[in-house]
Amino acid sequence: MSHAHTERLVSTVTEDGLVLEGAQFTPTQDTPGGTVVVWMHGFTGRFYEAHTVAIGRGLADRGYTFITGNNRGHDLGAFIQRQDRSPGLMAGAWWEDIGECKFDLAAWIGFGCQAGASRVVLAGHSLGAMKAVWYMGTCQDDRVSGLISASGPLRIWQRLGAAPERLATARALVAEGRGGELLPPDAGGRITSAATLVYRADLDTDVYGFQQPGAEAPLCNIRCPILFVLGSEEPEIGRKEDLPTLKSNARAAASTETVYVDGADHVYHDREHVVVDAIANWLPIVAAVPADR
């Protein structure tokens, strides 16, 4: 571990009483501009994934506090304890109600605010990026000064639309009180419970505005600066030619920047340092935006 920062395990409690674990990487010197980055993992992810830790350490070495936290969709299945010791929640990626991510994001943003910084940047990776865009576009959390969408799936709605019979089966199971049952894998090998598939379909997953160009997707409503990160080796997530559309759809944002990382797969293997540099170079833009923007 670098002497330029310290690391510690942390936890937070959501508004609905769930205890979520995470980690904090804190620079030993003062944070430039007083900025904290709060990072949310994606589908089946967890706060201590290798790429997340590498990015967190890199940013901490550059002088930025970095907080990475579990959300209720971590791992395949997870039994999440409640602070008051009442019955916990069966969740994880296979049983998550995606709309409840608002509680998780709000809790970790609050934790970031308590870290002593003057501004919080919310970063989401993969499904975590989709959640972050949806959250900021629908909840308008004024505590957040900047948003990073790192490899967010731009067309997840296509996956749902390509298998209407699968969604119909899921809805039937939910109606029968069997929403917790796991469905067979989809075309990409992904598994969820029937209820989780229905929750996702009912959320309107076109958060980036690719399904209905010109419509008011959540991305269109975000006012803070936004950084979009995309790797060249994750075409199922998005392509280089999609980046101008992202910038165009983020029409209310104070500013938008895009970073296309050549050679990067979905978890930025051996390219984490490029992502660190991109974020560190962008964060001063967030610091320059007036707080009342």
Image (cartoon, grey):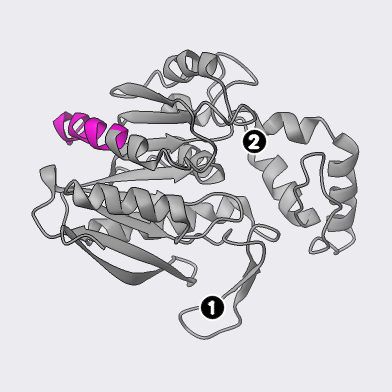
Q: Kindly identify which numbered label has been placed on residue 81.
A: 1
Which quadrant of the figure has residue 282? Answer: top left
Does any portion of residue 38 appear in the rendered image? Answer: no
Quick check: 90 above or below 36?
A: below
Q: Is residue 286 left or right of residue 258?
A: left
Q: Position of residue 250 (x, y in %)?
A: 42, 22
Q: Kindly identify which numbered label has been placed on residue 258.
A: none
For marks 2 and 1, the one nearer the N-term is 1
Secondary structure at badge 2 equals: loop
Which quadrant of the figure has residue 194? Answer: bottom right
Residue closest to the eye, 37 or 225: 37
**Main secondary structure type of the part rendered in magenta:** helix
Amino acid residing under circle 1: Gln
**Residue at the extreme front:** 270
Magenta stretch, residue numbers: 278-293
Residue at x 61%, y 56% (from the top left corner): 44
Q: Which residue is mark 2?
A: 204
Q: Position of residue 66 (x, y in %)?
A: 29, 54
